[in-house]
């Protein structure tokens, strides 16, 4: 009798433990208990909806068309601060979108580096922006751009990666280099990335537990940012913005957690094996990196740029993870991407 009672208790405890690591269902936009739909959306081939935002020069008149992939914890509303003067001078059309699970785009439980690239291609086709376009990704949006370089290079006029996320398990990285750089990030980040890579099904439980430090990026740990970044963050946080919570309004698992699982999971390819999409210099690929960046480490970005010499690598000696938000710097990035002009802002 005592054995049976113990067995029942064990089963109950295991059931409770299992439930604790299962994420709640997302609150889909437009559903009875979900957020309202306020943005234009397209329906993808797999039935999901993708929310988007158009800005700049009308696409029918634009000379340059750029699709942007937003960073971790943000949305299509948080664009690089490119000046209106430059937009009008060059005739730039911007198309931003909520990546799957963010903002008003439906979650994608099968989200991957490839699916992000396919979402971009389908968005471009449905909005009829033309056979070729530029892509520009910031931070976590960088893996979307790697996906474009791998899966839809024939659609690209150029590509830019601004402080792009790095996966420590890319096969081409020397083991000692990955280990050295991995050891420099905060302990909570190390554990979260390791779980995202090896045991992604446990990530929700890990990120919601309170006993051990987990993701510093989600928690906004102050040690993630150098002083240069903190000054920029204070400036932007002081601005009124009613949409701060909109990126994760459908739930943190299908937005933030899924981002970590894709970025630090097992990729379908090694970016350092990608071929130059512009062998005749008909376009260019760029990486912009801050030397003081504590989120995406400079040592690994340098290694990538050496392995892929066709990438134009720009390193800012006094820049952190947020340097592109400095006055005038986004203009310099866009000019370099579109015209080949080199940034001249000194930090």
Image: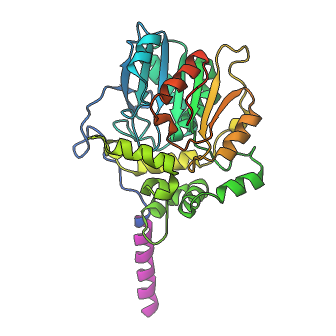
The residue under the point 59% across, 32% down is 147
Is residue 295 found left or right of 19 in the rendered image?
Answer: right
Q: Residue at x 40, y 76 (%)?
A: 12
Indicate the quadrant where residue 106 lies: top left
Q: Residue furthest bottom?
A: 2
Residue 337 among those drawn in magenta: no
Picture quarter containing residue 311? Answer: top right
**Image mark count:** 0
Q: Nearer the viewer, residue 327 or 241?
A: 327
Main SS of residues in magenta: helix
Where residue 82 appears, as percent x and y from the top left, is: 43, 25
With respect to residue 312, does 88 lie above or below?
above
Quadrant of the rendering where the N terminus is positioned? bottom left
- The spot of residue 243 in percent (x, y) is 29, 40
Bounds of the magenta segment: 1-19
Residue reaching furthest to the front: 346
Tell me the quarter of the image containing the C terminus. top right
- The residue nearer to you, when weighing 274 against 303, is 303
Does residue 98 appear to the left or right of 196 in the view shown? left
Q: Residue furthest toward the left?
A: 32
Q: Position of residue 259 (x, y in %)?
A: 49, 46
6 relative to 254, above or below? below
């Amino acid at each position: 009798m005592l054995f049976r009672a113990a067995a029942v208790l064990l089963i109950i405890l295991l059931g409770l433990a299992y439930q604790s690591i299962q994420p709640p269902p997302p609150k889909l936009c437009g559903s009875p208990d979900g957020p309202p739909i306020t943005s234009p959306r397209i329906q993808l081939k797999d039935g999901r909806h993708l929310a988007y935002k158009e800005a700049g020069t009308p696409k029918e008149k634009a000379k340059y068309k750029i699709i942007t992939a937003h960073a971790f914890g943000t949305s299509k509303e948080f664009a690089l601060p490119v000046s209106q003067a430059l937009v009008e001078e060059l005739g730039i059309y911007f198309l931003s979108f909520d990546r799957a699970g963010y903002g008003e785009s439906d979650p994608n439980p099968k989200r991957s580096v490839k699916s992000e690239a396919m979402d971009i291609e389908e968005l471009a086709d449905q909005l009829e922006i033309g056979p070729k376009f530029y892509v520009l990704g910031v931070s976590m949006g960088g893996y979307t751009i790697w996906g474009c370089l791998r899966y839809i290079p024939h659609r690209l006029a150029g590509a830019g990666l601004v402080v792009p996320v790095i996966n420590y398990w890319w096969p081409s990285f020397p083991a000692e280099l990955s280990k050295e750089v991995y050891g420099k990030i905060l302990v909570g980040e190390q554990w979260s990335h390791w779980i995202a890579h090896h045991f992604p099904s446990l990530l929700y439980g890990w990120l919601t537990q309170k006993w051990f430090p987990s993701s510093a990026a989600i928690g906004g740990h102050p040690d993630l940012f150098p002083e240069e970044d903190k000054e920029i963050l204070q400036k932007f946080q002081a601005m009124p913005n009613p949409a701060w919570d909109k990126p994760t309004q459908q739930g943190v698992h299908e937005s933030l957690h899924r981002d970590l699982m894709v970025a630090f999971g097992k990729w379908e390819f090694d970016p350092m094996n990608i071929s130059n999409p512009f062998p005749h210099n008909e376009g260019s690929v760029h990486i912009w990196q801050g030397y003081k960046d504590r989120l995406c480490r400079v040592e690994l970005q340098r290694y990538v740029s050496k392995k892929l010499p066709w990438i134009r690598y720009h390193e800012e000696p006094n820049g952190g993870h947020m340097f592109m938000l400095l006055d005038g710097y986004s203009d310099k990035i866009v000019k370099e991407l579109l015209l080949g002009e080199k940034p001249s802002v000194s930090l």
